[in-house]
Amino acid sequence: MLQESLVNKWLLGPRAKITTAERLGLSIDDELTTQDLLTNAATDHTMNAKRIVLVIDDEHAFCDVVAEILSNNGYEVEKAYDVVQAQSIIQNTRPDLILVDIMMPGVDGLSFIRQFRCDPCHMETPVIVASAKSTPEDYDDAIRAGANDFLIKPFSASTLRNMIDKHMTQPQLT
């Protein structure tokens, strides 16, 4: 159940009010009550649950940019700046897709993928490597570790969206 504080957050600023009104199919002159917003948001959440993408990269700016692109395209994004943080997120959230860098301090991305794939619950979760490493050997290593695909940094927003959309076309696991 959504809390009233979340609804109040939606109403901050004039653009948020317009967006909320448009989402509810109301004109800006219609009065929006907290109960209207709670009822609609609860219905919207059940009918159109967002797919969750976990982005794992030690570069905070990269995570922020990817999160902005994917959020604007209807995905919920969780960010982890190392593998330990990612594992904590995975314990509490079941991501529908993971985007992971190879080169990170501590545990690297390929070790994370191998460990992630050892759990039968995660065998079907798409994993995409996003890395500046770009040799054919790097690609082969990622696929052997259990990645489904490979994006070479830097890449465009449209390339990212297309790659994520391609792997999200599979039915959601319940």
Image: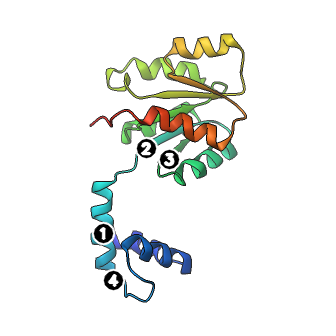
Give the x, y percent position of residue 134.
71, 20
Give the x, y percent position of residue 51.
41, 45
Q: Amino acid at mark 1?
A: Asn
What residue would you read off at disc 1?
40
Q: Are marks 3 and 1 in contact (CB under 8 Å)?
A: no
Check residue 77 in the rendering and tell me which mark sits there, or answer none: 3
Of residue 59 and residue 123, the one placed in the foreground of this image is 123
Q: Kindly indicate the quadrant of the structure image that contains residue 104.
A: top right
What residue would you read off at disc 4?
33
Give the x, y percent position of residue 41.
33, 66
- Measured in 3D between alpha carbons, the distance from the residue under mark 1 to the one under mark 4, in whole angstroms, is 11 Å
Q: Earlier in the sequence, mark 1 or mark 4?
A: 4
Of residue 27 and residue 46, the one placed in the foreground of this image is 27
In the structure shown, which secondary structural element does the residue marked by tag 2 occupy? strand
Q: Earlier in the sequence, mark 4 or mark 2?
A: 4
Q: Are marks 3 and 4 in contact (CB under 8 Å)?
A: no
In the rendered image of this protein, does residue 68 appear above or below residue 104? below
Q: Are marks 1 and 4 in contact (CB under 8 Å)?
A: no
Q: Amino acid at mark 2?
A: Ile
